Image (spheres, rainbow, N blue to C red):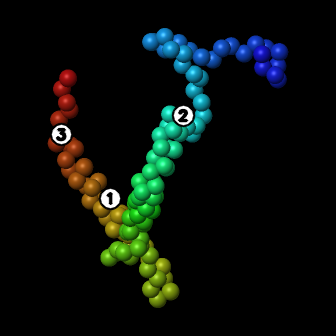
């Protein structure tokens, strides 16, 4: 019975097709014992563990590379006015793509089943 109420709580385990008990679903971020053991085993390999973290830092750094080294500015302040050329470029690319889609789509035939 639940401590908060006097109502009996039903059994929450289910039967799997092979006859093994299936535990109830836990919180999404909960790590299973198997994965916890795998992570601990991976952490025991010091070279691999540090290489993983160095790789992750370089990966995140590479995601920011467009902001660090780029030939097109994202933001320009010129003679007291602010400009955002990246949005003009992205908007123009969107309009060109939209034009191409509208030119191609009317010529397509519906798929026959």
Cα distance between the residues tagged 1 and 2 = 45 Å
**Residue 66 image position (x, y, % from top left):** 38, 68
Taking the image as shown, residue 104 lies to the left or right of residue 57, namely left
Q: Looking at the picture, tell me which residue is in the foreground, 57 or 99.
A: 57
| First in residue order: circle 1 vs circle 3 | 1
Mark 3: few, some, or many residues within 10 Å (few <14, many ≥20)?
few
Q: Give me the residue at 68% from left, 13% from top.
A: 10
In the rendering, at what x and y percent does residue 37 appear? 51, 38
Compared across the picture, whether 96 is left or right of 25 comes to left
Q: CA distance from mark 2 to mark 3?
A: 50 Å
In front of the other: label 1 or label 2? 2
| The C terminus sits in image quarter | top left
Q: Nearer the viewer, mark 1 or mark 3?
A: 1
Q: In the rendered view, tell whether residue 32 sits above or below residue 12.
A: below
Numbered label attached to residue 71: none
- Residue occupied by mark 2: 32
> According to the image, label 1 marks what residue?
94
Mark 2: secondary structure: loop
Residue with the most extreme bottom position: 79
Please tell me whether residue 102 is drawn above or below residue 23 in the rendered image.
below
Helix, strand or loop under label 1:
helix
How crowded pointer 1 is (Cα within 10 Å; few <14, some 14-19, many 20+) is rated as: few
The one nearer the camera, 78 or 42, is: 42
Dividing the picture into quarters, in which one does residue 93 lie? bottom left
Question: Percent x, y for residue 65?
Answer: 38, 68
User: Would you say residue 8 is visible in this rendering?
Assistant: yes
**Label 2 close to label 3 by CB (< 8 Å):** no
User: Mark 2 or 3 closer to N-term?
Assistant: 2
Q: Nearer the viewer, residue 31 or 2?
A: 31
Residue at 31% x, 59% y: name it: 95
Q: Residue at x 22, y 44 (%)?
A: 105
Residue highlighted by disc 3:
108
């Amino acid at each position: 019975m639940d401590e908060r109420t006097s109502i009996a709580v039903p059994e929450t385990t289910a039967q799997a097709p092979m006859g093994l008990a299936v535990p109830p679903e836990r919180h999404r971020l909960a790590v299973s014992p198997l994965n916890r053991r795998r992570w601990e085993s991976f952490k025991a390999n010091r070279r691999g563990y540090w290489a993983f973290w160095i790789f992750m830092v370089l990966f995140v750094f590479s995601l920011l590379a467009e902001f660090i080294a780029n030939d097109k500015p994202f933001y320009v302040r010129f003679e007291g006015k602010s400009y955002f050329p990246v949005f003009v470029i992205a908007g123009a690319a969107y309009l060109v793509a939209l034009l191409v889609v509208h030119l191609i789509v009317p010529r397509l035939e519906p798929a026959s089943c």
